[in-house]
Image (cartoon, rainbow, N blue to C red):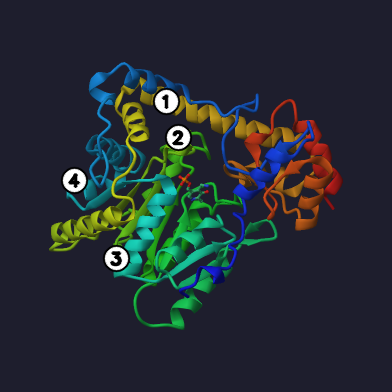
């Protein structure tokens, strides 16, 4: 330490690095199926209609959109109000009581990643430095927790032979808990549309998993980056949050952390709009606990980036709080999910793959092809088709004009 000459080279980002390579590729048939950005059937990243109309309202409103001064540390108060209502009254009515009792701490964050960063910083400062992450997971999970004070990144079994390995998962948690005392551990749970596998536990499996996490006193961190992109119904897709906040079954002694993003379900990727909410436990001194959590979250944000950006949260706020735009937003999300389902169906017509046979097993934006690194490389080098190294394919990069080309190539490298 202490010398700039000794700094080792960090590996390139597993996903974003590939787009740089794609941009340089001269093949006219090149196809980018790496990043999780939704594209329409014409290969365009379009603004949701609801969002475009909210932007028009903002453009015309002196009151709403000319104040470019700082937002408060915890974000725009109206945004907070409307996001809390969306999450804990509409998506998860089981949370309404916690909201009414003033037990939910909230910060507007720099999208889902920002929520995870603030969460991990908070937990490592006060509660835990040990986190369970599914194997495999979004590669940035480990990075974010490591960067924010976690020295113990543990992986729970998740995927085996194209299905969920729920027994392996529960065994791992059990064994991990037995081998240690001390502060509680945390666990990252993908709320729906698991990235990268697209395989989610059934309700019954979630029940077993939540029971085990609760029994072992592990702190749940729900990562909800794809709400709405599974079934097309924003409310339905929040089932994990609803199950977790069933008060007859669970009392999360150390709170429950929800990291939520509007990147995918409002198409606000680059505007960085999301939230962290902490549902604090029922106690005689709940109010004090919540106020203390609030104060520490504020201090963390102040030291990290001071306050969040304004524009995107104003757009989201107009969508959430204007009834006809909110209805339109729900339709926009439905359209996205419908197109993802139809791409999967088209692929299933052309490819005799097990992973495509049972469509109900694949959730969300990605198809986990099961192709090995060599095949992924062949696709890239021979066909200029770009997948993530682990074989994850972003479905919305497929459309009527390239689906045949891509399916033929996939078939040729599939063994
Ligand atoms: N969690 C998961 C599982 C994700 O796939 C993503 C997006 N790739 C995120 C969180 C956060 O994304 P963002 O910061 O853009 O909201």
**Position of 305 compared to 132: left or right?**
left
Label 4 within 8 A of ligand 1 by Cβ: no
- Which residue is denoted by mark 4 in the rendering? 100
**Position of 141 compared to 106: left or right?**
right
Instruction: Report the mark closest to the observer, 1 or 3.
Output: 1
In the image, which disc is placed on residue 268?
2
Name the residue located 53 percent from the left edge and 73 percent from the top edge. 172
Spatial separation of the CA atoms under disc 1 and disc 3:
36 Å
In the rendered image, residue 232, in percent from the top left (x then y), is placed at 50, 34
Label 3 within 8 A of ligand 1 by Cβ: no
| Mark found first going from the N terminus, 1 or 4 | 1
Considering depth in this image, is 222 or 166 the residue closer to the camera?
222
In the rendered image, residue 22, in percent from the top left (x then y), is placed at 70, 41
- Which residue is denoted by mark 1 in the rendering? 51
Res 240 visible: no
**Position of 343 compared to 223: left or right?**
right
Q: Using a 10 Å C-alpha cutoff, classify the residue at mark 3 as few (fewer than 14 neighbours), some (14 to 19) or many (20 or more).
A: some
Q: Using a 10 Å C-alpha cutoff, classify the residue at mark 2 as few (fewer than 14 neighbours), some (14 to 19) or many (20 or more).
A: many
Spatial separation of the CA atoms under disc 2 and disc 3:
32 Å
């Amino acid at each position: 330490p202490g010398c700039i000459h000794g700094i080792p080279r960090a590996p390139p980002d597993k996903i974003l690095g590939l787009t740089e390579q794609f941009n340089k590729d001269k093949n006219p048939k090149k196809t980018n199926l790496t990043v999780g950005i939704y594209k329409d059937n014409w290969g365009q990243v379009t603004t949701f209609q609801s969002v475009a109309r909210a932007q028009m309202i903002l453009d015309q409103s002196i009151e709403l959109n000319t104040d470019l001064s700082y937002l408060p540390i915890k974000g725009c108060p109206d945004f907070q109000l409307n996001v809390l209502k969306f999450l804990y009254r509409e998506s998860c009515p089981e949370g309404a009581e916690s909201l009414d009792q003033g037990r939910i701490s909230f910060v507007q964050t720099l999208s889902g990643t920002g929520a995870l960063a603030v969460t991990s910083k908070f937990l490592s400062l006060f509660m835990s430095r040990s986190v369970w992450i599914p194997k495999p997971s979004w590669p940035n999970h480990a990075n974010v927790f490591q960067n924010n004070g976690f020295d113990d990144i543990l992986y729970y079994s998740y995927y085996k032979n194209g299905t969920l390995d729920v027994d392996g998962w529960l065994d791992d948690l059990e064994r991990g808990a037995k081998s240690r005392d001390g502060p509680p551990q945390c666990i990252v749970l993908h709320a729906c549309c698991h990235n990268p596998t697209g395989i989610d536990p059934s309700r019954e499996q979630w029940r077993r998993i939540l029971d085990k996490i609760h029994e072992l006193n592990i702190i749940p961190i729900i990562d909800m980056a794809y709400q709405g992109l599974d079934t097309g119904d924003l409310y339905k897709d929040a089932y994990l949050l609803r199950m977790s906040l069933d008060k007859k079954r669970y009392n999360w002694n150390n709170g429950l952390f929800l990291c939520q993003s509007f990147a995918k379900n409002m198409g606000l990727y680059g505007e960085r709009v999301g939230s962290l909410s902490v549902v604090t436990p029922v106690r005689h001194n709940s109010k004090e606990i919540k106020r203390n959590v609030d104060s520490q979250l504020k201090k963390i944000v102040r030291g990290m980036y001071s306050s969040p950006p304004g524009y995107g949260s104003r757009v989201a706020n107009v969508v959430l709080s204007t009834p006809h735009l909110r209805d339109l937003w729900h339709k926009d999300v439905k359209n996205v999910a419908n197109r993802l389902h139809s791409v999967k169906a088209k692929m299933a017509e052309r490819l005799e793959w097990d992973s495509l046979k049972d469509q109900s097993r694949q959730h969300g934006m990605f198809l986990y092809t099961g192709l090995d690194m060599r095949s992924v490389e062949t696709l890239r080098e021979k066909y200029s088709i770009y997948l993530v190294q682990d074989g994850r394919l972003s479905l919305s990069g497929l459309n009527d004009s390239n689906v045949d080309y891509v399916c033929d190539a996939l078939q040729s490298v599939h063994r």
